[in-house]
Image: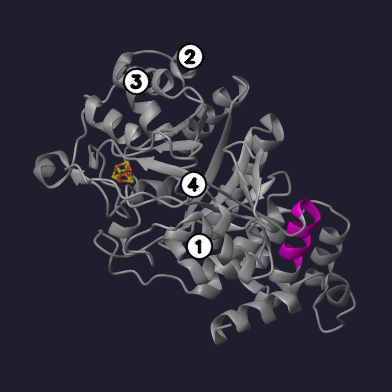
Amino acid sequence: MSLNNYYICTKLEIMRNNIHILLEDKTLNSTLQTIAQKVSKSERISDEDCLYLYEKAPLGYLGTLANYIREQKHGNQTFFNRNFHLEPTNVCIYTCTFCSYSRLIKKRSEGWEYTHEQMMDIIKQYDGQPVTEVHIVGGVLPQYDVEFYSNLFKAIRAHRPELHIKALTPVEFHYIFKKAKISYEEGMKLMVESGLDSMPGGGAEIFDPEIREQIAKGKCDAQQWLDIHRILHNLGKRSNATMLYGHIEEYKHRVDHLSRLRELQDETGGFQTYIPLKFRNKNNELSHLPECSTIEDLRNYAIGRIYLDNFAHVKAYWPMIGRTTAQLSLAFGVNDIDGTIDDTTKIYSMAGSEEKNPAMSTEQLVNMIKEVGRHPIERDTVYNIVQDYMDYDFSQDPKPKGFIELPVIN
Ligand code: SF4
């Protein structure tokens, strides 16, 4: 075992099930003691508590509480799925200042715009591969309209009926429905009828209007983002929620963001997973900002887990934060580390993420989870168990479950 892995395992051992020691710790101030007591009794913490945690709580304290909740909900189980990304275009009409991925329409020759046929060619590359989900998200372009996406979903559904289509965010939906002059209700119903199974959590960024204006001007606002999720939930479908952190926002903005997510979840119960997304500072208009530390990443995961008592899952997106931090996050409230994606996703590598080529085979992902003493389980998009990998023998596997290299179509 490498020194790094030894360190991680030791750390996990210390963190696990230590809440009772924490409750007896007389050195904690009264606010931290009160919050720990609430968590130990499965009581909800307030927005004020949440802000206090961001401002004052030490890392070990947060990890202990978050890990307690994580193990109450899931024990040692750590989920991942086998999916691939389809990014129709990186040309975009918006100019989000944190975005390293998009190319403005006037510079569209630097980007890519897949045709319907090219996208179906990508889908077909996975024929016979044991993937359960296609994750579709990209830039916003006027010609990629309601009809375009409706036809794409129908074609994928017709080609591979069992493949779960997790696609687009309220940013794209708001734009295409407005352009088509149809209501969110009509639009989402049409998308679901065309084959949409669920929605990823992107486009949330930070809900606070002043921060949103500075980093994501012109995109759907917080209310619109939440409304589209509510409508999808009311159609019986599930979605995820993200928060982009570590740029110009303050802790109070993170609390406000989490509070709005928790409120909608109380109403619909339709969110599955909360996914904090770390701001990366390469190749974007906010490159002058420093990135937050790994410590802050772990604190943020933990606080999300503690505050969002009505969310089942917290996910660390390993292509963005790197494999080691993803492993560490499993002791700070995280119980899902996304999927065995391949290099069809360029969003995070273009933003300066840890992973330049974010591909990992199932065996590698399973080993990563087991190295830190957790129990790897492959899930489908809606958390049905596909395969328990704790004692899986990859050498006996007749069909190697690895990623496949795809041609890059520009
Ligand atoms: S974050 Fe999304 S909406 Fe904003 S510029 Fe990038 S691709 Fe476009």
At a point 49% along the width and 47% down the height, the residue shown is 399
Q: Considering depth in this image, is 47 or 336 the residue closer to the camera?
A: 336
Quarter of the figure with residue 264? top right
- Kindly report which numbered mark, 3 or 1, lies closer to the viewer in this rendering: 1
Asked if ligand 1 lies within 8 A of label 4, the reply is no
* Earlier residue among tags 1 and 4: 1
Give the extent of the magenta segment.
65-74
* Earlier residue among tags 4 and 3: 3
Amino acid beneath label 1: Gln
Q: Looking at this rendering, what residue extends furthest in the bottom direction?
A: 3
Q: What residue does disc 2 label? A: 193
The location of residue 315, given as percent across then percent down, is 58, 53
Q: What residue does disc 1 label? A: 364
- Mark 1 element type: helix
As measured in the structure, the alpha-carbon distance from the residue carrying label 3 to the one carrying label 1 is 43 Å
**Residue 408 is one of the magenta-drawn residues:** no
Q: What residue does disc 3 label? A: 178
Q: Residues within 10 Å of mark 3 (few under 14, many from 20)?
A: some
Q: Is residue 113 visible?
A: yes
Q: Main secondary structure of the magenta part?
A: helix
- Kindly report which numbered mark, 2 or 3, lies closer to the viewer in this rendering: 2
The location of residue 196, given as percent across then percent down, is 47, 24
